[in-house]
Structure formats: structure tokens, C-alpha cells
Image: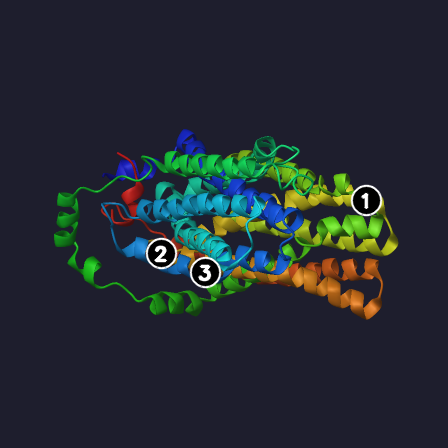
Amino acid sequence: MDTQQTQVGLSLGRNLKIGLFHLGSGMTDILLNGVWNRVMVADLGVSATPVSLLLALRYFLAPIGVWAGRMSDQRLIGGFRRLFWIWLGRGLMALSVLLLGFATADLARGAPTDLPHWALIAVALLLFSLGNGLSGSTFLALLYDRSTPDQRGRVVGLVWTFLLLGFTVGGVLFAILLPSSEGEAGTAGALSFTPDMLQNLFVIAALLLGGLWFFSLLGEERRIPRAERAARTDDQPRAATETSSLRGDLRLAWSDRRTRYFFWYLGLSMLFAFVQDPILEPFGGDVFNMPGDVTTRFAAYWGTTAILGTLVFLYLSRRYAWLTNTRLNYVGVGLLLATFVAFGVAGLADLRWLVTPGLITLGLGLGLWNVGTLGLMMDMSPFGRAGTFLGFWTLVVTLARGTGVFSGGVIKDVSLALTGNVSVAYAAVFIIGAVGLGVAIYMLSHIDAASYKAENQSQPADTTTVFAGSMD
């Protein structure tokens, strides 16, 4: 591999192909959190507590991403650095979808919700969470490897857009695959679909998602022949033997003032941005008496504007060099802060007309902030340790987001218990979220991403170990 090949990076066509990976990720999120969650709780009458706990397993297993990222930095498996871990993880996720489909369809046929069925469901979601942890940070590391620094804004922007498209495509496709029916004997009147339809949905989904995850990355990392691997070991003995420890890498991240502030910014912005996640639709129903068919369209409003905002940014960032990831974070978090204030005021003053404009600015803010944050995660990952650092940043994101989702419901319930006023309870969530985002902006102001990137992402021409993903 020569220098020219390294500098070419990732073409737009290949970027779109890789984006299909996260199209599958978005569809998977809808399948589990939308379809399976609803079937278990609403249709089969299972308690929401064990279902929610099993869906939250991915948060508890998030530290695996740090380990997988570090292993992908240091070792080649079968000649690949990233693909082994990504495909292993996504293979486990596809298998888990199959197992989950069979187990849930069996319950829909009238099987008792006994220990063997719960064990199968738990194993399925454990495999899903394990696969998600193994493949998440290593996929980001592959994007890092395959793109030049100037391309990374476009790369993460398109991948994020495909993730949002996955939510829409998954919702439409799964609604088609699981239409209403009279049900089978023994379940008529209890279910609006047959168990066979449910099972077929999960089988088709597993095959489709597995195909997307495989095809999207096929040929995107060059396999290093055995002879070349042996030559590298001979030519670079120190690189092969003098690897730092995981604790040393994390200590390095914490010792630098810039990465330390980035840690706080990432955690605070994720935590407070997602306090709205569990209460946004109930906010419309409880405060403004909006019907269910209106609140279910909330995601369509903010999702569409998030996609449009991302595409506009991609266009402008190619024309104006000053539109950096840091500035994008300022704009995105600023829009989120303003939106939270607007929602809080709307709830307290009964201003229903503020909700729709708020959903539009929420989408713009989420889109710009997510793309900018992904870009900063790459900017703040040093060359040669990208997998480890991206695994660490992904861990921070996952734990902070999970805490934020949980905290949103807690703040609302505690505020309602203290005040007895539903409008005040929801407003408290948004106002606290806005204050937290303000603190996150303060942390962002102390991050000098440009200097960190210049100091830590030098790519010498003869360095090929990490750039195993560059194509011939």
C-alpha cells in the first residue's frame, strides 16, 4: 500500500455503500424497541419491567466496546483488523433476532411464559447486546481508517443519515410484514396478527439485516496476506512488542486537558439531550390532550428535519472550511437548548402552537449535534489508538444516553409527586435539560480539537498497520 492509496480515502460511492450498515442498525432499533417491545407488553401482557431490563442489556455490556476497539488496534485476525470484530458482532445480532422471533412466536401461540422461554429470550438479547458492543466502536474505527481527516465530516454525516432512514424504512417495512389479522385459533381476539406472521417477520428481518451488514462492508478492508504480515513483524519489532496497556491509554486520555473536557462535554450533552426521549410523546398527550395519532408523528417531524439538516451541513462543510465539527456542536447543542426552553415555556403557559416549531428545531439540533459529535470523537482519537479511544468515547455515549433516558422519567415522576401539576412536571424535565446543555456548552468551549488533531493524528507514509483498511 502506498501513500497515494492512503490519501485517496473513501469515495462518495463507497461511503453510501458503507452507510447501508447503519440502515440496518436503524431498522434493528425499530424491530426491538418498537415491534418486539410492543408485542411483549401490549399484545402478550408481559410486565414492562423485565422487557425493559433485557432491552437495556446493551448499556450494561457497553464496556466490551473498549476492549474490542483495543484488540482491533493491536491484532490482525485472519488478515483483518476491524472486519473480524464487526462481522462477529453483527452475526451474533442476526442470530439473536432469529432466536427472539422463534421464542416470541411460541409465546403468541399460547406457550407459558416459563423459565425456559425467558431463558431463550434472555440469551437472545444477551447475544444482541454482546454483538452490539463488539461491532459498534470497531465500525467507527473502520470509518476512521478508511477516510482522510478532511473526509470524516462527510463520512459520519452520511452514515448518520442512513441511521435515520433506517428508522423510517424499518417502521414501514415491519408494518407491511406484520399486518392486522383475525389471528389463529386460540389467539383470536387477543392478537391482531398470527404467530406465524410474527415469526416470519423476525426470520425475514434477520436475513435482511445480516445481508445488509455483510454487503455494506464487503471489500471495505484490505486483507493483509500472511507474507506481508510477517514482513511487518520483522520490520517493526518495537511496534509489535511495545504496546501500551488499556489502563495506560485511558490514563493518557484523562491526562490531557482537552480530552478531559471532551469527556465531560460528551457525557453531559448526551445525558441532558436524551432526558426528553421517554417523555416527549406523553408530554403532547398529557399537557395538550393531543391524540395518539398526532403524537406518533412527532418522530416523523424531528426525524425529517434531522436528515435535512445533516444533508445541508454536508453541502456547506464542503464549501466552507470554517464549518468545523466544533462549530457544528455549538450550533446543534444551541438549537437543542433553545428547543428545551421552548417546550418548557409551552407547557407552563399552555402554548400548544410552540410544539410543532419545537419539533423542527429539535430535529435540526439532534442532526447537527450527532454529526458534529461523531466528528469530534474521531478528531479526539489519536492515530494508532483509534479503536481504543473510539471504544472509550462510545462507552461514554452509551452510558450517558442510558442515564439520560432513565433520568427523564424519574425527573417527571418526582416533579409530579412534589407539585401535583402535570405541566410543571414536564416543564421541569425540559428546563433541567436546558441547564445541563448550557453546562455542556461551557465544557465544549475548553476543547481545542484542532491542536489535538494536529498533534495526535499525524500519518507517516510508511505507517500501514492501522490503515489496513485502505484499498488497493
Say few, some or many: other residues with alpha carbon within 10 Å of mark 3 (under 14 / 14 to 19 / 20 or more). some
Q: Is residue 96 left or right of residue 38?
A: left
Query: Quadrant location of the N terminus?
Result: top left
Q: CA distance from mark 3 to mark 1?
A: 37 Å
Pair 1/2: label in front: 1
Q: Which residue is mark 2?
A: 68
Q: Position of residue 359 (x, y in %)?
A: 72, 44
**Is label 3 in a helix, a strand or a loop?**
loop
Q: Which residue is mark 3?
A: 61
Of 245 and 130, nearer the camera is: 130
Asked if the residue under mark 1 is in contact with the one under mark 3, i.e. CB atoms within 8 Å, the reply is: no
**In this view of the protein, can residue 444 be seen by the observer?**
no
Q: Position of residue 357 (x, y in %)?
A: 76, 42
Above or below: residue 430 compared with residue 199: below
Q: Position of residue 297 (x, y in %)?
A: 71, 39
Q: CA distance from mark 2 to mark 3?
A: 12 Å
Quadrant hosting residue 387: bottom left
Q: Position of residue 73 (x, y in %)?
A: 31, 54
- Seen at 54% across and 55% down, the residue is 55
Above or below: residue 52 compared with residue 155: below
